[in-house]
Amino acid sequence: MSPAVRPEDFLGIDQLLSDEERDIRDTVRAFVRDRVVPEVGGWFEEARIPHELPGKLGKLGVLGMHLEGYGCAGTSATAYGLACMELEAGDSGVRSLVSVQGSLAMYAIHRWGSEEQKQRWLPLMAAGDAVGCFGLTEPDSGSDPGSMRTHARRDGADWILHGQKMWITNGSLADVAVVWAGTEEGVRGFLVPKGTAGFSTRDIHRKLSLRASVTSELLLDDVRLPADAMLPGATSLKGPLSCLNEARYGIVWGAAGAARACFEAALEYSTSRIQFDRPIASFQIQQQKLAMMALEVNRATLLALHLGRLKDAGTLRPEQVSMGKLANVNAALEVARTARQVLGANGITLDYPVIRHMNNLESVVTYEGTADVHALVIGSALTGIQAFR
């Protein structure tokens, strides 16, 4: 006889993972269950994230875990994705911290930096002893990074940076910022250590989403940097865009984790909530909601796994990552909204994870490329026609 269906793994996706991948997934899941879930509602309510969390994540081994050398674990892309899924099942803010650290800041240094830059920063960042942020988005330059106003000019052997970056995760928490600026030679990346003269941060408050996360402005007032602060390998927008593609890949997995957390909360609630002398899970309309949520969670997980296998094979295209982000974040939003209905009034409290995930996903759907932009990326790949301009 076929084994019984397990609600937590309806399609038997576990069988598609290697023993090592399951071990990594389970290790991160246990960390999230023990260290994040009991506290994250309070972090969200208080709009903070503990300053000691990067160190704990470093000890867990998830910071830059998919990178090779320099204290990084060198895992597969699929294993990194599974970690992102478990982290975001806890909270999008925690996964964002890890994504920005590993897939944006560390990846930029690993891919485009000098050997000296790698040796200086990557071991510290992998351990969580130094935090990084990634300065690309500006107040008037979000989906169109090519229109950035931040610029850098040479002054003898030095560089002078001037400009402003906006919506920067980890901003005021960071020990080093990877800042992208226009130059006469094209778009270049610069490493700006915390405390550099003329460099300051200003946190963004009154957020109703990603509250368990630091979001900041970066202010660069004629910041003087030595020549070796520049990332030598990046000379165009290809530099920052390659980093964004790495982060978007993690979001594909993370969104599936947020959706799963909402579905599991709704399933547990519906089987214990009694109305009309029976659990609400016994009513057809609630079973339909549960079935549709399970469908989206499993479909999102399979899509993420497929993209992970493509990435490990070296054949994953940016357009495919765009499809994954568009599909999985939209699916996660629908699951969160449905779960909130199943929980009724309890669905809006921080005693349950649903409204927190629902609010967070409203940020995830627009950062690292809005849903509209990813649809245009897919449309361009389908038709061969660029619709951005």
Image (cartoon, rainbow, N blue to C red):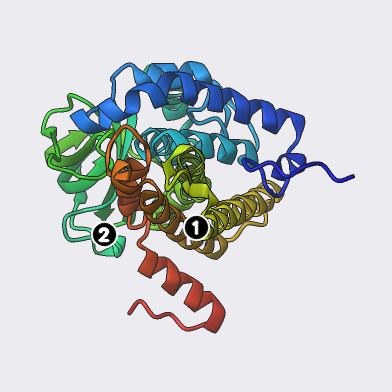
Q: Are marks 1 and 2 in contact (CB under 8 Å)?
A: no
Q: In this rendering, which labeled residue sits more in front, label 1 or label 2?
A: 1
The residue shown at (33%, 16%) is 52
Q: Position of residue 371 (x, y in %)?
A: 38, 64
Question: Which sits earlier in the primary sequence, circle 1 or circle 2?
Answer: 2
Look at the numbered disc 2 and give the secondary structure of its residue: loop
Q: Position of residue 153 (x, y in %)?
A: 20, 48
* Quarter of the figure with residue 24: top right
Number of residues whose C-alpha sits closer than 10 Å to that of mark 1, classed few (under 14), some (14–19) or many (20 or more): many
Residue nearer the viewer, 27 or 352? 352
Residue 124 visible to an observer of this rendering: no
Number of residues whose C-alpha sits closer than 10 Å to that of mark 2, classed few (under 14), some (14–19) or many (20 or more): many
User: Is 353 displayed left or right of 245 in the figure?
Assistant: left
Look at the numbered disc 1 and give the secondary structure of its residue: helix
Which quarter of the rendered picture does the N terminus lie within?
top right
The residue shown at (69%, 41%) is 6
> Which residue is disc 2 drawn over?
142
What amino acid does circle 2 point to? Gly
Which quarter of the rendered picture does the C terminus lie within?
bottom left
Residue 211 visible to an observer of this rendering: yes
The residue shown at (24%, 34%) is 214
User: Is 10 displayed left or right of 384 in the figure?
Assistant: right
**Mark-to-mark CA distance, 1 and 2:** 36 Å
Q: Position of residue 339 (x, y in %)?
A: 42, 50
The label number, if any, that marks residue 289 in the structure image: 1
In this view, 205 is above or below 235: above
What amino acid does circle 1 point to? Lys
